[in-house]
Amino acid sequence: MMQYVLSFFAVLVTIFVFFSKKVFNSFLYRTVLSVLMVAIYVVYLAPDVAITEAMLGALLTTFVYLLSFKIHSKLKVAVVRIPVICQKYQDTFAGIIPKILEDFSKEYNHKIEYVEVLTIGECMKLIEKGEVDLGITFKGDFKILDVPYYMVNNKELSYFELINLNSLSEIKKISNKVFYLTFSDKNSIEFMEFSSFYTQDYLKKILKNYKLGGI
């Protein structure tokens, strides 16, 4: 009877290993599975196999996984300086997108490395070449914010740049541009993690903190 109960839980935990959305949770389920297998081998009177599973499966594998999780995976992000969206203060980036990436990196144990460029077009080129993992674009995977753009004194400025100007002679709204975060590899673990992390409720919370949402 005991072997059937243990086998049932082993199959159940195996399903959790494969379908868990978070890598760290899969690692925990994998450790639980090893412990269950040790118990199953003991029930079937195979102590030598149980000891091997305990040493290799439960202990050594767990240690290797823990070690790998302590080592941050690095994500290279192409960014452009845009008020409120992404700003730079000395050596630190701040704004809506850096805040989102900061929360994501804490959740999934990543380290963010910013690659600053001058235009959104340059961001897109780096993404297409695979030289960065993700970046700011006007069309892509995860929508961030719709921002009005204006022509001011023959210069194109975003809404956030416009409100910081002291004197204006001629203003004309020309378009709305939508900012996205776009990944270079849609099959990567990081893309799947971000898909799970980045929800509409989370985005509304971030925009509310910046008093945005309907500009």
Image (tube, helix red, strand yellow):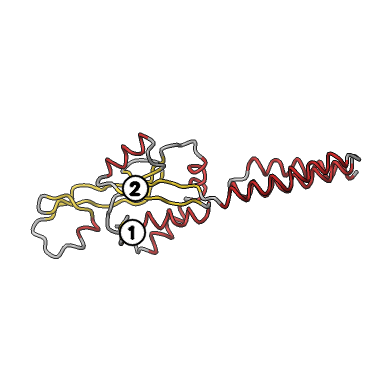
Residue 115, numbered circle: 2
Q: Relative to residue 151, is residue 52 depicted above or below? A: above
Q: Residue at x 27, y 54 (%)?
A: 82
Q: Is residue 170 left or right of residue 130?
A: left
Farthest-out residue, left = 169
> In the rendered image, which residue does mark 1 sit on?
91
- Lateral position of residue 58 relative to residue 75, left or right: right
Image height of 134 relative to 202, above or below = above
- Residue at 88 percent across and 39 percent down: it is 46
User: What is the three-letter code of the residue carrying label 1?
Assistant: Asp
Labels 2 and 1: the sequence-earlier one: 1
Q: Nearer the viewer, residue 205 or 123?
A: 123
Q: Position of residue 62 (x, y in %)?
A: 68, 48
Secondary element type, mark 1: loop
Label 2: how many Cα within 10 Å (few below 14, some 14–19, many 20+)? some
Q: What is the CA distance from the residue labelled 2 to the residue labelled 1?
A: 12 Å
Label 1: few (<14), some or many (≥20) within 10 Å? few
Quadrant where the N terminus sits is top right
164 or 184, which is in the foreground?
184
Query: Where the C terminus falls, by quadrant?
Result: bottom left
